[in-house]
Image: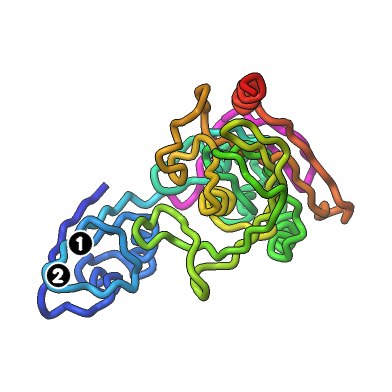
C-alpha cells in the first residue's frame, strides 16, 4: 500500500480534488483516482469527500494507493453449497463471511474465485475479475445467489435484474418492535458524504431510487423478525433502509450504531439471509424458484428470542 500526504497550495484553491490529485500523483488516471475517492482511500483533513470537492489552501490530502489486482482472477478450490446447477446457471447458498468478488482488502478467498475453480468455463463470462457474477450479497449476509455460467445466461440474468423481474426475498431480525405490519420504503440511496465507504439515504434529487418492501412476521420484546423484498438492488439497500427507519439489522456494525452489540447471543455476520430467489431460466424460458432456510447462526438468535418471550 502506497501512502501519500499532500498539502494544497494557494494556486490550487478551488480546484476539484480529483483533478488536483491527477496533476500531483503521476501514473494515476482520473478514473482510478475517482475510484479511490469512492472507496474511501482519499481523505481531506481526515474526512472523506466527493470527487467534486473543491480544495482549499492548506488542506491536507491523504491518499492510499492499493496495489492493482492481477488482470485475471485465479481460481481457488473453496467449498461451495450448490443448490442447483446446470449448463447455464449455478445457484449457491452463500455463507456469511464470504466476499462475492475481489475488492478493496479482499483480493483472495472470494466466491467468484471458488466458482472459477468449480466451473472453469465461467472465465470470460462478465468481467475478468467477476466471472459469472450478475448480482451480489454483502460479505456478512448469507443466502441465495445465482451465477451465470455462459454468455447467454449472463445477458439474460443481467437484463432481468435491470427489468426488476428477479424476485429476491430476505429474512431479517432487526432491533426494536416495528409497529407497522407491512410497508414500502421508497428513499434514494447514495454514498455517505462523511464516509465514502458507507451508503446513506439522501434527499430528493440525490442518489439513486431505492425501493424495499417489508412485512413483519413476528415481534419479540426488543426485536422484530421481518421479510424484506427488493424492488431495486442498491448497495446495502435493506441495511440502509431499515436503519433509516430506526430498526437496524441485528449484528450490523456499520449501520447499527450503539445497538450493534446489543444481542442476547453471539452472532456471526448479519441477521440477514436471502431466503428466496426466482428468475426466468435463460435457456428454458421457464420461471424457476429456489428457497433457503435460515442458517443455524440466525436460528440460534431466533430461538433465544422466542424463549425469552
Q: Is residue 26 left or right of residue 194?
A: left
In terms of image quadrants, where is residue 177?
top right
The magenta region covers: 70-92
In terms of image quadrants, where is residue 37?
bottom left
Above or below: residue 98 compared with residue 236: above
Give the distance between the C-alpha atoms of the residues marked 2 and 1, in whole angstroms.
7 Å
Q: Nearer the viewer, residue 161 or 202?
A: 202
Asked whether the residues under the numbered discs 2 and 1 touch, taking CB atoms below 8 Å apart as contact, a structural biologist would say yes
Q: Is residue 142 left or right of residue 64?
A: right
Q: Is residue 232 visible?
A: yes
Looking at the image, which residue is at 52% across and 49% down?
246
Colour setup of the view:
rainbow
Looking at the image, which residue is at 86% across and 51% down?
287
Q: Secondary structure at mark 2?
A: loop
Residue 8, label in figure = 2
The residue to which callout 1 is attached is 61
Assess disc 2: are there few (<14), some (14-19) or many (≥20) residues with their C-alpha within 10 Å of its C-alpha. some
Q: Is residue 129 visible?
A: no
Amino acid at each position: 500500500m502506497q501512502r501519500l500526504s499532500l498539502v494544497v497550495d494557494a494556486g490550487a484553491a478551488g480546484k476539484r480534488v480529483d483533478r488536483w490529485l491527477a496533476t500531483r500523483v503521476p501514473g494515476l488516471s482520473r478514473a482510478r483516482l475517482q475510484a479511490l475517492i469512492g472507496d474511501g482511500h482519499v481523505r481531506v483533513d481526515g474526512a472523506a469527500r466527493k470527487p467534486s470537492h473543491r480544495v482549499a489552501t492548506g488542506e491536507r490530502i491523504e491518499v492510499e494507493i492499493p496495489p492493482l489486482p492481477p488482470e485475471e482472477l485465479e481460481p481457488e478450490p473453496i467449498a461451495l453449497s450448490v443448490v442447483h446447477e446446470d449448463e447455464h446457471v449455478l445457484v449457491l447458498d452463500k455463507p456469511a463471511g464470504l466476499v462475492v468478488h475481489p475488492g478493496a482488502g479482499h483480493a483472495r478467498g472470494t466466491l467468484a474465485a471458488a466458482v472459477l475453480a468449480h466451473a472453469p468455463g465461467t472465465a470470460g463470462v462478465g468481467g475478468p475479475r467477476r466471472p459469472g457474477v450478475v448480482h451480489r450479497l454483502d460479505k456478512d449476509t448469507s443466502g441465495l445467489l445465482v451465477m451465470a455460467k455462459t454468455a447467454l445466461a449472463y445477458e439474460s440474468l443481467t437484463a432481468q435484474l435491470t427489468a426488476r423481474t428477479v424476485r429476491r426475498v430476505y429474512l431479517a431480525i432487526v432491533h426494536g418492535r416495528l409497529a407497522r405490519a407491512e410497508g414500502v420504503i421508497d428513499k434514494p440511496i447514495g454514498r455517505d458524504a462523511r464516509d465514502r465507504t458507507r451508503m446513506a439515504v439522501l434527499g430528493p434529487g440525490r442518489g439513486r431510487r431505492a425501493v424495499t418492501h417489508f412485512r413483519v412476521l413476528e415481534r419479540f420484546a426488543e426485536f422484530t423478525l421481518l421479510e424484506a423484498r427488493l424492488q431495486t438492488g442498491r448497495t446495502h439497500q435493506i441495511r440502509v433502509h431499515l436503519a433509516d427507519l430506526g430498526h437496524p439489522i441485528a449484528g450490523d456494525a456499520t449501520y447499527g450504531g450503539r445497538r450493534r452489540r446489543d444481542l442476547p447471543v453471539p452472532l456471526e455476520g448479519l441477521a440477514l439471509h436471502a431466503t428466496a430467489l426466482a428468475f426466468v431460466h435463460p435457456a428454458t424460458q421457464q420461471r424457476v424458484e429456489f428457497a433457503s432456510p435460515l442458517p443455524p447462526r440466525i436460528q440460534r438468535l431466533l430461538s433465544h428470542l422466542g424463549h425469552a418471550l
